[in-house]
Amino acid sequence: MNRVQRFVGFVYREVRMRTREGRPQWIEIKLEPHGGIRGRCSQCQRPAPGYDRLAERRWQSVPLWGIPTYFCYAPRRVECGEHGVIIEHLPWSEGKRRVTCAMMVFLARWARRLSWRETAQVFGTSWETVYRSVEWLVQWGLAHRELQGVESLGVDEIHWGHGLRANNFLTVIYQIDTYCRRLLWVGKRRSQSTLRRGLKALGPEVVKGLRFVCSDMWTPYLKVLAAEAGQALQVLDRFHITTHLNQAVDQVRRAESTRLRAVSPPKAQRLKHLRWPLLRRGNRVRGRARQKLNALLASKLATARAWELKETFGHFWDYKSLIWAGAFLDYWCYRALRSRLEPMKKVARMLRAHEKLLLNWFRAKGEISNGAVEGLNNKLRVVTRRSYGFRTYEAMEIALYHTLGRLPEPESTHSFC
Ligand SMILES: [Zn+2]
């Protein structure tokens, strides 16, 4: 057992299996203080003379052969010169917790692969214990994580839960450098003050060292980023622009579909089942959907024109030269504004208003991880969707840091899982 986990100043006394009607119930591992080594103060960890001994306590530890396993030990109290009579330092435990540190790491790691409820069921413990274990590991990780060398930030808003109230939105800050993508911060709401809070939590050194900040055209974010990280190049994310274009096409399709159903049902048929094909990139639409799409494009329907505009905009991202990209943008906006399609005109006006930031995308090419925000958002949604079981926002926040934060973990001699 010393090869698995060695605790200096303590020895393993005996291991015993408790049975009932011949079946194993649990395993007890008894620990004793090492005869020649004095206990340490739990505050300052300095050796101190012994005072007395408390009753035996139990800590749930990593199960052996699937049988619940407990550490049993009667803690000493020591008389520290500085802290008085105090309980001794126990290297396998933290504070008043009833599970060992190894067990907390063990549960927290499994809680990344299974849901928290499943983890609790499989390892014979409670949901609450799993939650507290994850929380402990996350807090340790946040306190020990390295924030040096963060050069690119992605900021986004995420919808969470039911409804559209301010509290149903989260602001997330990602690191999106090509060599490291992770969640750095998450907070409730999507206002200027939320983002300020987030940047403050990262600290002035990180904010001053930023070279790129990437976000949607959401004014509160743009304002705060310009004010707080003025030295960094502000970039609009390709993925967000594509989303805006897709939403516009979908609005055109819905409006036209409603209009046609009233006047000419056969024509309305043409727009059926086209929602998803229209949102994909043109060369990715195959099979029957492709046939329907071709038929639509041959028609003079508004949806077809909107889709064509969206598809054309895709070329924008392929330009190598800033000047040509700018010229293309002008041309595209000119066409969109004359399309008589209100949703498309709205996008064109928005792009025009943010032309400078949009062109920054070419200045940052290759430096920030392309599609990182989109990828991290997708992973994040897996957690928030699963999290309807979470009782509180705090639990979800912990889960997000746990799965997306790439946090460091305390080192141990043995990896249990
Ligand atoms: Zn002390």
Image (spheres, rainbow, N blue to C red):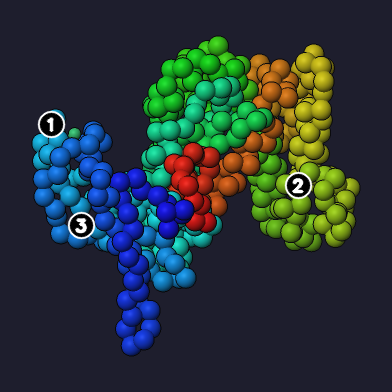
- Residue type marked 1: Gly
Q: CA distance from mark 2 to mark 3?
A: 65 Å
Q: Is residue 354 visible?
A: no
Where residue 268 appears, x then y in whole percent?
A: 75, 57
> Nearer the viewer's eye, disc 2 or disc 1?
1
Q: Nearer the viewer, residue 218 or 274?
A: 218
Tag 3 residue: 74
- Residue type marked 3: Ala
Where residue 139 appears, x then y in whole percent?
A: 38, 40
Where residue 114 appears, x then y in whole percent?
A: 51, 60
The disc, 2 or 1, on the residue closer to the chain's N-terminal end is: 1
Residue drawn at (32%, 54%) of the image: 11
Determine crowd level at label 1: few under 14, some 14-19, many 20+ residues with C-alpha closer than 10 A. Answer: few
Please tell me whether mark 2 sits on a helix, a strand or a loop. loop
Tag 1 residue: 81
192 sits to left or right of 211: left
Q: Are marks 2 and 3 in contact (CB under 8 Å)?
A: no
Tag 2 residue: 280
Q: Nearer the viewer, residue 169 or 140?
A: 140
